[in-house]
Image (cartoon, rainbow, N blue to C red):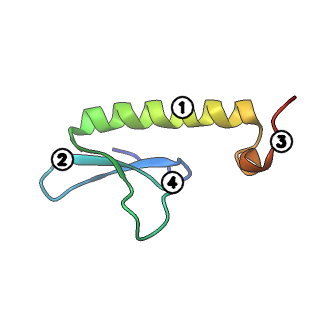
Amino acid sequence: MDNDPSARYQSRQENDGTWTVFDTWTPSGREARMISGVSEDRAGQYLERLNRLFRQASSALGSSDDADSREPDP
């Protein structure tokens, strides 16, 4: 499975052969697993959907860099 290195959500194959989808923005030292124990096909489906939703939300809010600092519209 190809992971886009710039994507927020990525996947990895575990030692038992299952796949885990994780959030790359989770701070180091914290549990970054979101979805685990799934097939490669299912992990790919989750990755596509999560990254698409994240891009849509980011563009709706403007740049993802300043999304947290924006003031809500009155």
50 with respect to 65 (left or right): left
Q: Nearer the viewer, mark 4 or mark 2?
A: 2
Q: Nearer the viewer, mark 4 or mark 3?
A: 3
Secondary structure under badge 3? loop
Residue 27 placement (x, y as % from top left): 49, 65
Q: CA distance from mark 2 to mark 3?
A: 42 Å
Quarter of the image for the C terminus: give it. top right
Q: Nearer the viewer, mark 4 or mark 1?
A: 1
Structural crowding at the residue carrying mark 3, measured as other residues with C-alpha within 10 Å and reported as few (<14), some (14–19) or many (≥20):
few
- Check whether the beta carbons of the residues at disc 4 and disc 2 lie within 8 A of each other: no
Residue position marked by numbered label 2 in the rendering: 18
Disc 4 marks which amino acid?
A: Pro
Secondary structure under badge 2? loop
Of the numbered discs in the image, which one, if any, rests on residue 34? none
Structural crowding at the residue carrying mark 2, measured as other residues with C-alpha within 10 Å and reported as few (<14), some (14–19) or many (≥20):
some
Q: Earlier in the sequence, mark 4 or mark 2?
A: 4
Residue position marked by numbered label 3 in the rendering: 71
Residue toward you, 38 or 2 = 38
9 with respect to 70 (left or right): left
Residue position marked by numbered label 1 in the rendering: 52
Q: Is residue 35 above or below residue 60?
A: below
Residue furthest to the bottom:
29
Q: Is residue 33 above or below residue 63?
A: below
Quarter of the image for the N terminus: give it. top left
Q: Residue at x 36, y 30 (%)?
A: 45
Q: Nearer the viewer, mark 3 or mark 1?
A: 3
37 with respect to 23 (left or right): left
Q: Residue at x 63, y 30 (%)?
A: 56
Q: CA distance from mark 4 to mark 2?
A: 20 Å
Q: Earlier in the sequence, mark 2 or mark 1?
A: 2
